[in-house]
Amino acid sequence: MNDSLRAARVATFVYFSLCGTLMGIWVVNIPAIEERVDISHATLGGLLVLLGLGAFLGMQVAGRLTDRLGARVVVPATGVLCSAALVLPGLARDPWTLAGALLVFGFCNGCLDVSMNAHAVHVEKAYGRPVMSAFHSTFSVGGVLAALVGAATASAGLSPAAGMAAMGTLGVVIALVSARALLSAAPTAADDIDSAHAPAPARRGTGGRIWVLAVLALMVMLCEGAANDWSALHLKDVLGAPASTAAFAYGTFAATMTIGRLLADRLVARFGSMAILRHGAVTAGIGITIVTVSPWIWAAFAGWALFGLGLSGCVPQLFSAAGHADPAAGANVSRVAGLGYVGMLAGPAVIGWLTHLVALNHAFVLLILLCAVTAAAAGILRTVPDRTTQPAPSGH
């Protein structure tokens, strides 16, 4: 394994962590910004739609740019833009300026998200073995760093604008310093080159498979989004847990998801990505079923833990499969990530709408069904070239 490839892998970890940290800094400052702009929770919910819309648009633009210009150009550029845009919500004075700030920040974040995932696919191809899940785990680590930084800046008495400007400045430096270690735009594995020269019939069905992967990403990320917003409320409202206890429901889910992503690459190398997607979806389905039917708080914690563990390896496999489908890694990842992001945003809203019809825990039946469909459709990953059969480069 040459030093340049190791450096590219480390740089990819850095960009994933940076992306998670930047988004996390915004999240931890939401209460202060909401109070400063003087808006209601309902208005904030509407403005967050603009954040998602901006991210979706950014993903579509960045996917094509990454294929055209190369990840080595687009990743650091979007890292700089996203870091610079972080300060905009902190500077907002009214709902209109906050709306514009969230649209711009969402766009830049979506660009960084897709371009770094496309680069991660190139790194994975060069390694000849699964490494995607580990990258996604560092995104979660970035969220933890954001919580620590947010707490430190708040205790120091810094305003949201000052704290976000400081983190954004640091992010610009990190994005620029890490740029030189990224891989070039050229394909890094023989299978990438071979697929580029494959006859048309061999690649004719790629587009349809990409959209199937995108729909699966939507379903999996809808489940993840629902857990983010409703896990704590489930313990509090359905099981009667105190707020201090209920807060640990999301913590349990997030912790097992992070741990699962740290372990997933080794499991993919041994059992294959299809097995991880199928068994992960089944595990998640079992977990959310326990949450749905159990009257005990301890069992609910176990259910949320299984739900996070099961979902942990699913999204990285879908992103990776999209990137490996043909040479247009950026465009393919943008489709899968874009539709998946729609699911992430829609999850809380869909569950909220269902609670007007049924109890919250009964609304989780939808998540059980989505996990079942994902497990049944996991065979789609058979159509993607098996990465685990490629020999790893010598020296590692």
Image (tube, rainbow, N blue to C red):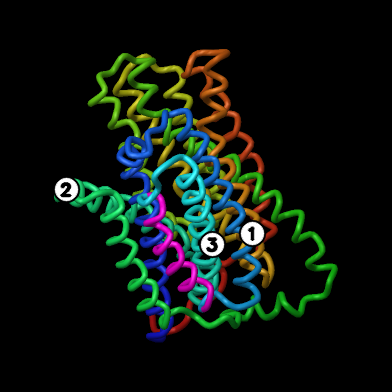
Q: Amino acid at mark 3?
A: Cys
Q: Amino acid at mark 2?
A: Gly
Write down the quadrant of residue 204 in the picture. Answer: bottom right
Q: In this figure, which residue is indicated by the disc labeled 3? A: 111
Mark 3 crowd level (few <14, some 14–19, many ≥20, 10 Å Cα): many
Q: In this figure, which residue is indicated by the disc labeled 1? A: 60
Whether the magenta-drawn stretch holds residue 236 is answered as no
Of residues 149 and 355, the one nearer the viewer is 149
Q: Earlier in the sequence, mark 3 or mark 1?
A: 1
Which residue is painted at 59% across and 52% down in the image? 56
Q: Is mark 3 in CB contact (under 8 Å) with mark 2?
A: no
User: Which residues lie in the magenta part?
Assistant: 73-89
* SS label for mark 1: helix
Q: How far apart are labels 3 and 1 at the CA level?
A: 8 Å
Q: Is residue 158 left or right of residue 332?
A: left
Which residue is painted at 41% across and 73% down in the image? 9
Image quadrant containing the N terminus: bottom left
- Residue 137 shows in the view: no
